[in-house]
Image (cartoon, helix red, strand yellow):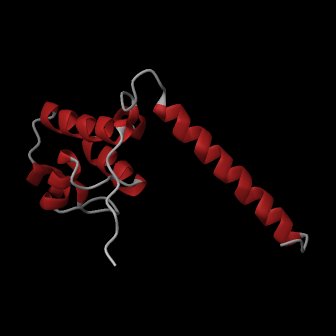
Amino acid sequence: MASKSIEMGAAGNGVKDAIRALRIDRRMTLTDMTEALKSTDRPLSKATLSQLETGMRRIDIDDLFAIAKALKVDPRELLRDAVEGEKPAEMVYDVLADIEHSIDRLRTAIREGRA
């Protein structure tokens, strides 16, 4: 069964545009980025990078952090203008805080034998 493609949203488009803009600003080719990513735990091929920048492939959080490292920027820089009028970096941190809180509650429940 074929999976249905999910259209790229405003945040994804903002991130892909930020990646390309920063890469070009740093005068890096896709090959240069591929080389820089080899030093991360998430090496990506030139074809994959091209797909990310053109929106043919969705970026996941691991890709985002590796690309930020390769570009030598804080990952929040890639999220800064992802959604006009919103603060996506803060949204991500809020979600991460919620996840951490849920994990802590689950660990407590396991220790107390309630899970």
Residue appearing at x 15%, y 34% in the figure: 26
| Outermost residue, bottom side | 1
Front-most of residues 49 and 10? 10
Figure quadrant of residue 22? top left
Residue 113, compared with residue 50, is above or below; it is below
Horizontal arrangement in the rendering, residue 62 relative to residue 101 (left or right): left
Front-most of residues 39 and 53? 53
Figure quadrant of residue 93? top right
Please provide percent x and percent y for residue 41.
35, 63
Please provide percent x and percent y for residue 73.
33, 37
Front-most of residues 66 and 49? 49
Residue appearing at x 36%, y 49% in the figure: 64
Residue 57, compared with residue 95, is above or below; it is below
| Outermost residue, top side | 85
Horizontal arrangement in the rendering, residue 45 relative to residue 83 (left or right): left
Looking at the rendered image, the quarter that the N terminus falls into is bottom left
Front-most of residues 73 and 16? 16
Horizontal arrangement in the rendering, residue 46 relative to residue 62 (left or right): left
Residue 112, compared with residue 55, is above or below; it is below
Looking at the rendered image, the quarter that the C terminus falls into is bottom right
Please provide percent x and percent y for residue 14.
31, 35
